[in-house]
Amino acid sequence: MLIAYLLTWNVQMSYGAAAEDVLGMEQQAALRGEQRAAIFALGLLLCLLMLLPILNLLVPALLCSSVCHLQRRDWGAVEILTNVK
């Protein structure tokens, strides 16, 4: 349980900040719930990339771009909750 929390902590913290001005707290929570598995996989991938000496420089850029992509991708799936196109 602790490992799962640590792997997804960075992604979840960035997830809320990426849609702070666009979505409400309930909508952000709904999107996070819909993409729990994708957030975990992304956290695991970024954790593994941090272990590689040169590729770890790309982690902040990958974190920001992938979190924004995850949110925008799922807006259509939960259109009723978000009312954002």
Image (cartoon, grey):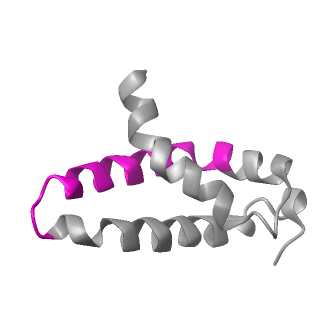
Considering every residue shown, the one lying at the far bottom of the view is 85
- Comparing 84 with 12, the one in front is 12
Q: Position of residue 51 (x, y in %)?
A: 15, 52
Q: Position of residue 42 (x, y in %)?
A: 40, 54
Q: How many marks?
A: 0
Q: Is residue 73 above or below residue 4?
A: below
Left or right of 55 on screen, residue 37: right
Residue range (magenta): 32-54
Q: Quadrant of the C terminus?
A: bottom right
Identified at 86% across, 56% down, the residue is: 24
Q: Main secondary structure of the magenta part?
A: helix
Q: Is residue 50 above or below residue 58?
A: above
Left or right of 8 on screen, residue 82: right
Left or right of 57 on screen, residue 81: right
- Comparing 28 with 61, the one in front is 61
Does 66 lie within the magenta span? no
Give the quarter of the image for residue 57.
bottom left
Q: Position of residue 48 (x, y in %)?
A: 21, 51
Q: Quadrant of the N terminus?
A: top left
Give the quarter of the image for residue 21.
bottom right
Considering every residue shown, the one lying at the far top of the view is 1
Identified at 60% across, 57% down, the residue is: 15
Identified at 76% across, 63% down, the residue is: 20
Identified at 81% across, 70% down, the residue is: 22
Q: Position of residue 5 (x, y in %)?
A: 46, 32
- Comparing 68 with 79, the one in front is 68
Q: Is residue 78 above or below residue 22?
A: above
Does 40 lie within the magenta span? yes
